[in-house]
Amino acid sequence: MSKNISADLMLSLKRAKFATVIAFILNGFALGTLIARIPDIKKSLLLTNSQVGISLLLVAIGVFIALKPAGKLCAKFGSRPIIVFGTFAISFATVAIAFSNTLTELRVALFLLGFATAMHDIAMNAHAVTLEKKSSKRMMGFFHANFSIGTLLGGLFGGLLSQFEISLSVQELSISIAYLIVLLFIKNLYLPASADIHIKEENFVKSKSPGIFWILGLFGLCAAMGEGAAGDWGGVLARESFNASPFVSTLPYIVYSLMMVVGRLSCDRLATRFGSANAIRGGGFISGTGLAIGLVIGNTGGVIFGWFCIGLGLSIVMPLIFSAAGELAHGKYNGQVAPSVAVARVSGTAYFGFMVGPPLIGFISDHIELRWSMLLVVGLSYLMLLAGKYAKTN
């Protein structure tokens, strides 16, 4: 009997792992396809860098507003129904983008997309934490690698559609329909909602959030600022500063996304072998040094090299921080903070970086050359040298 139960549990975990992988891919793909079309949006609406920055800020605001309720909803109802809701919401937001014909309409749609992807993001990360706990295996790097695979595929898809002058509306409508179809096939594969419901979250010890979650969040913020700035401005830098073609201008983001995949697929192994602290420190050094060299080179090849190093270096930071938050909630702070709420608290601080990073680069680049405004990311990367010891999970 026990063997049958063990086999059933193993099958359930494998199915849930597969569905969670798909969730991470879908989340990344939605953002990747949009990011690849930012130069087209900028051109079609005749926007300045500051206007693009403000528009991207609406995505980040949507993310930020969704984080706290997402964590509490996952704790109350379980992560599975929130993942399903989030997928529906992403589908709706992409339709809103498809029918946006003015800057105001676009900004509203981008806000909705930010809100939807954040709800989905917190739920899928909470589900991933539960899978790590139940299987006693480090998996967060693998899951985040699949998010990066999603952004990579999205960047390729958006870049090709841009090159062949396929409209953004056609792109987003196609994505919306595809997401609903995929959801029909995977929604019953997740672990049941009861697997990570914390109904008594309101009865947990009423105290301020432990300082370690804020510390983890602050270093995550630095990494997120670097990731957000790299993702949103690589295409604009290549096209406007170095006259790259529409498809070539997507290559920095594509290379960045590819190295995010490579780094995150190696993340769990590296953290196990060398420790989380050393892995994060090494990543920060690679990102900061490589980007600085790429900016000094000063051509499209330099941009691609710099974005290669950002992707490889910063790829491991967020997975290790999320994993640390979940492990602390399950262990040292069990009964005080639900794992989903811990993830949301860390995310709420860290994702503020996605909020301020891209628009800050935009504002700086209105006063100095966009190329040199990216030195901000160099500095943020080097801060990872101080971050490692706070994300230890072994």
Image: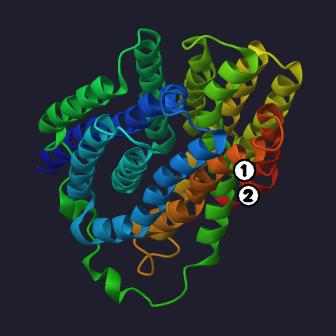
Q: Which mark is residue 277?
A: 1
Q: Percent position (x, y) of residue 226?
A: 68, 44
Image spot of residue 260 (x, y percent): 58, 30
Q: Going from the N terminus, do you reach mark 2 or mark 1 first?
A: 1
SS class of the residue under badge 1?
Answer: helix
- The answer to whether residue 164 is above or below residue 21 is above
Above-or-below relation of 315 to 120: above
Q: Are marks 2 and 1 in contact (CB under 8 Å)?
A: yes
The circle on residue 347 is none
Crowding at mark 2 (Cα within 10 Å: few <14, some 14-19, many 20+): some
Residue 192 in view of the camera? yes
Question: What's the amino acid at mark 1?
Answer: Ala
Crowd rating for badge 1 (residues with CA inside 10 Å; few <14, some 14–19, many 20+): many
Say whether residue 186 is left or right of residue 217.
left
Q: Can you give x and y, in whole percent of width and height, for residue 24 in the image?
A: 38, 39
Residue at coordinates 80% horizontally, 40% vertically from top-left? 373
Looking at the rendering, which quadrant does residue 341 occupy?
A: bottom left
Residue 271 appears in view: no
User: Residue at position x 64%, y 56% from top?
Assistant: 221
Q: Using residue 132 as the reference point, say whether residue 286 is left or right of it.
A: right
The quadrant of the picture occupied by the C terminus is: bottom right
Whether 40 is drawn above or below 392: the answer is: above
Q: Callout 2, which amino acid?
A: Lys
- Image location of residue 359, percent across then percent down: 64, 49
- The way the protein has been coloured in the rendering is rainbow
**Residue 389 tag number:** 2
| Gap between marks 2 and 1 measured at Cα | 5 Å
Residue at 43%, 65% (x, y): give it.
65
Residue at image position (52%, 60%) is 347
